Image (cartoon, grey):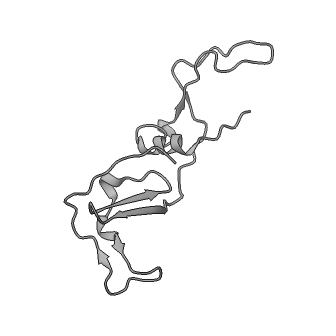
């Protein structure tokens, strides 16, 4: 057996593609010919049509906000999350509040109310 750890950028790219590895029914593995060699030099013949996953464990860890940058000159906030999120369909921009301190919402804080110029980009980096 070989256990392969998927790096963060590949994992985020998989999560962003809802057509692949979204469940047991959409998880297949293709191994190209020659990718595996046994101890006597015999090459794996390859799996042409994909082998279905024997098991699948979904992502159950909630994303976290790792960092953000505020640019007061151009009027933008860049949010960095721990994993890929569905920014286009489920992101609620009205849940963003700029605050003056760490503890709680205080007078003078500002909730974002306009969605007019919100843009989304996917960074497959981890």
Image: 81 above or below 47: below
Quadrant in the rendering for residue 93: bottom left
Residue drawn at x 43%, y 81% as measured from the top left: 101
| Total numbered badges shown on the rendered structure | 0
- The residue located at (76%, 18%) in the rendering is 38
Seen at 47% across and 82% down, the residue is 103
Q: Residue at x 57, y 48 (%)?
A: 57
At which x and y percent is residue 3? 69, 38
Q: Which quadrant of the figure contains the N terminus? A: top right
Q: Is residue 22 visible in this depiction of the protein?
A: no
**Quarter occupied by residue 61:** bottom right
2 or 115, which lies in front?
115
Q: Is residue 11 visible?
A: yes
Residue 59 located left or right of residue 97: right
Q: Position of residue 87 (x, y in %)?
A: 34, 54
Can you name the residue that lies furthest to the bottom here? 107
Asked whether 53 or 87 is in front, the reply is 87
Q: Is residue 99 above or below residue 65?
A: below
Q: Quadrant of residue 95?
A: bottom left
Residue 26, x across and y down, in percent: 47, 36
Residue 35 relative to residue 41: left or right:
left
> Relative to 68, does residue 43 appear above or below in the rendering?
above
Residue 59 in picture, x, y percent from top left: 53, 52
Task: Tell me if residue 6 comes above or below residue 108 in the rendering.
Answer: above
């Amino acid at each position: 057996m070989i256990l392969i750890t998927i790096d963060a950028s590949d994992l985020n790219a998989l999560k962003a593609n809802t057509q692949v590895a979204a469940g047991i029914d959409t998880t297949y593995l293709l191994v190209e010919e020659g990718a595996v060699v046994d101890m006597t030099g015999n090459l794996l013949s390859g799996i042409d049509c994909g082998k279905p996953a024997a098991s699948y464990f979904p992502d159950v860890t909630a994303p976290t906000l790792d960092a953000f940058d505020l640019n007061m000159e151009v009027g933008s906030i860049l949010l960095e999350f721990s994993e890929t999120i569905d920014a286009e369909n489920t992101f609620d921009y009205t849940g963003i509040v700029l605050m003056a301190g760490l503890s709680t919402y205080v007078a003078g804080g500002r909730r974002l109310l306009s969605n007019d110029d919100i843009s989304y980009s996917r960074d497959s980096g981890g």
